[in-house]
Amino acid sequence: MTTTHRFDTLAVHAGYEPDPATGAVMPPIHLATTFAQQGPGVHRGFEYARTDNPTRRLLERCLADLEGARFGLCFSSGCAALATVLHTLGPGDHVVCGDDVYGGTHRLLRRVMEPLGVGADFVDLTEPRRLREAMTPRTKMVWIESPTNPLLKVLDIAALAEIAHAAGARLGVDNTFATPALQRPLELGADLVLHSTTKYLNGHSDVVGGFVATNDEALAERLRFLQNAIGAVPSPFDCFLVLRGVRTLPVRMRRHCESATQLALWLAAHPAVERVHYPGLPSHPGHALACRQMRAPGGMISFVVRGGLPAARALLESTRLFTCAESLGGVESLIESPPLMTHGSIPAAERERVGIVDGLVRVSVGLEDVDDLRDDLAHALEVTSRGAR
Ligand SMILES: *Cc1c(COP(=O)(O)O)cnc(C)c1O
């Protein structure tokens, strides 16, 4: 198995060859916490399972190969991965972060890192020149998502990498929404790529996990040190489940994208819907960039229902197939209200400023029959607009 294979082949084979001892085509789950040493410090590469274990090592190699990275590290959650990355910074350092990011990213920067002396500014980076204006001599890291969450804005990764590098800062990209099946940030110039493997990579809504990849050896070494020192590592069982999930990633992503495109077009023409955010729509301001930077526009849609919070609430209470729940990227379709749920930890004034309006609803389009999904939304929107009349 080499990394020169095409993506769909890598997804099935990366990180693992049939076990030479048994021929098993899927790896064993190594639950051992410690590994025998022939003498102090003399061992076969594993000492203690927080530091490294065989199941995690396979997943780290697999995910790094999918991102086209030299180094990969797994964590117990996406937030743990980000917290560990942010610990490469110290007092006096500064982060420029996209203004439309995962709520937990905002919370980590504002409420965990800021008290430790790491400053952060949240900036709309859809215009790359805004980054140049936001950089300070202390800026060490630029952190973005693309497409963004929940507004599905598309950011120019290559242009932002160039500006960050010119000022001596690193660019980190949270690639959770796109996955490496659709977008590979390191190839576009990013220094770090992060995932909540909880979402599309595992894909079955039964693991919480995180991942970071980089080509920078010194950075990888520092992250490896922090991964062990902080210890926010995933269990071998969870690593196995993510590895299993990744095998079908390309197939799942194709279906997510096809169904989301159909639903976005349909929603955009619906009278109860004020606005649809989906990079696959030709009317989306980031559509051309998405076509250049991504293989397909992804499985996430957000839209604004007429009637504000009461309408959004009624919609979430009326769907039958779309489950009202946080999270995304699983086989089942989910629907949520960012202001009430995922982005509730962001102060209302800041939400309003970035465009997370009360009527905003976010859906994760699952793998069900798209006609059933459309019928479900049609019925729920009918109930919602009846309530508003
Ligand atoms: C869910 C999510 C995270 C956080 O990951 P956890 O696994 O829940 O800790 C980070 N970024 C994005 C874009 C996410 O969707």
Image (spheres, grey):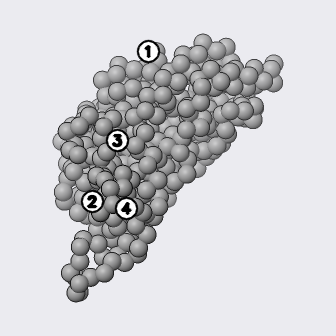
Q: Report the Cα–Cα distance between label 4 and label 1.
A: 43 Å
As drawn, which residue projects farthest toward the front?
Answer: 22
Q: Residue 308: which quarter of the image?
A: top right
Q: Secondary structure at mark 1?
A: loop
Label number found at residue 282:
1
CA neighbours of label 3 inside 10 A, class few (<14), some (14 to 19), many (20+): many
Tell whether 306 sits left or right of 103: right
Mark positioned earlier in the residue sequence (3 or 2): 3
Please give the name of the residue rendered at 43% of the width and 32% of the height, measured from the top-left corner. 251
Q: Secondary structure at mark 3?
A: helix
Indicate the amino acid at tag 2: Pro
Image spot of residue 66 (x, y percent): 30, 43
Between 387 and 134, the residue placed more toward the observer is: 387
Indicate the amino acid at tag 4: Thr
Q: Report the Cα–Cα distance between label 1 and label 2.
A: 50 Å
Q: Are marks 4 and 2 in contact (CB under 8 Å)?
A: no
Q: Secondary structure at mark 4?
A: helix
Q: Are marks 4 and 3 in contact (CB under 8 Å)?
A: no
The mark tally for this picture is 4
Label 2 belongs to which residue? 20
Image spot of residue 330 (x, y percent): 54, 41
CA neighbours of label 4 inside 10 A, class few (<14), some (14 to 19), many (20+): many
Label 4 belongs to which residue? 55
Q: Report the Cα–Cα distance between label 4 and label 2.
A: 15 Å
Q: Secondary structure at mark 2?
A: loop
Label 3 belongs to which residue? 11
Mark positioned earlier in the residue sequence (1 or 2): 2
Label number found at residue 330:
none
Q: Residue 291: which quarter of the image?
A: top left
